[in-house]
Image (spheres, rainbow, N blue to C red):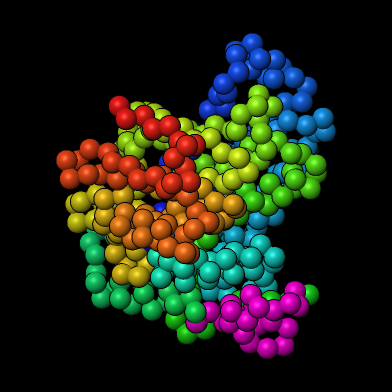
Amino acid sequence: MNIIFRTFQSLFIQCIIYVVLFSSCSNDVALEYKKSNLRKVIKGRAQGTTYSIKYFSEDTIVKKDIDSILNEIDFSMSTWNKESIISKFNSGQDSVLLDKHFISNLSLSLTYHRATEGSFNPLVKPLLDYYGLGSANENTLSIDTGKIQELLKSLQLDSVKLFKGSRVCKIDELMLSSNLSESVRLLQTGFRKQFDFNAIAQGYSVDIVADYFINSGVSSFLIELGGEMYAKGIHPSGDNWLIGIDKPSSEEEARSIQAKLRVLDKAIATSGNYRKFTKIDGVNIHHTINPTTGFPAKNSLLSATVVANDCATADAFATAFMVMGLEKSIGFLLSEQGETLDAFLIYEGKDRNYKFYTTQGLEEMLEIDLN
């Protein structure tokens, strides 16, 4: 999480990916599908943002069931919900009982933290608050290097302690445990820790909702929550689902499409650093904070769109790449660790024009607008 922390209040959602739902079929055929009784849409609000689900099925998924799933996750990991598990721990409680959602995100976060050499870190909340980017929104006028170094002491994810059953353990032991029936508590030890899962939680939420649809027998759907997506099956028009990716622009009203991406049975997440800023020493600072240094990340990368098998992974690496920068991100994608990922990276060239990097797996799926 060096980190584009998209919060549950959607304060930090950078690149809104949205569905274009074009197909190669004729307008008449497209209209026929649109009017079909098989085509259904569910829309709502959750986790401080909106969600939209388009699916094709003879059966109907009840909206309240989707809202119930998202509310359950919200009461686990929303930093904006004062009654959530994460808020209770962040407020200073010495021990909090964890649920399955928190445990899953804690375990996944350690995996991504190690894979990115610390660029992804769910303990970054104190830094976000210091820069005025977190839910506490405590804006600061200047950067105190001593204060930053002090805050970094609370970002050691490997030192997190849990109480499982009757013994103290670390996250590693929790991940390896086959006994999931014992209660698990998160403990405050040493330097006070505060979690923020906003760079993974919406992707994780998309995965949970996708599992619900699959288990309900729905084989063609597109789920979007706060810009994170999962596309399942073939669109009834005969084509893969078509997704639009935003062109980097600091002007909200100037939003336009940079590229179109066709996907099948994949998750998509995008992070960017060109819309949300805070002012430090009279200078606009974007909200991608490097948890390894404690300072705003400075690199040429403007946005990172990641395609993965699950949305939690896509979400986490889209965030981490914005911290890592262009060269390190490309190196990771070309390594054995990155072989299950595809990505479309937009960066600023030396001539200040947009440049693009596309992994080989996306080349035939991606159409870039070069204008």
| Tally of numbered tags | 0
Q: Residue at x 35, y 45 (%)?
A: 357
The vertical placement of 103 against 339, above or below, is below
Residue 188 falls within the magenta-colored stretch: no
Q: Which residue is at 59% across, 45% downward?
A: 266
Q: Position of residue 269 (x, y in %)?
A: 50, 47
The quadrant in which residue 116 appears is bottom left
Residue 356: image x %, image y %? 33, 42
**Magenta stretch encompasses residue 169:** yes
Q: Residue at x 25, y 44 (%)?
A: 348
Look at the image and tell me whether residue 120 can be seen.
no
Depth check: 313 or 208 in front? 313
On screen, residue 32 versus residue 127, left or right, reads right
Bounds of the magenta span?
Answer: 159-180
Q: Which residue is situated farthest in the bottom direction here?
A: 167
- Compared with 233, 286 (above or below) is below
Residue 16 % position (x, y)? 46, 39
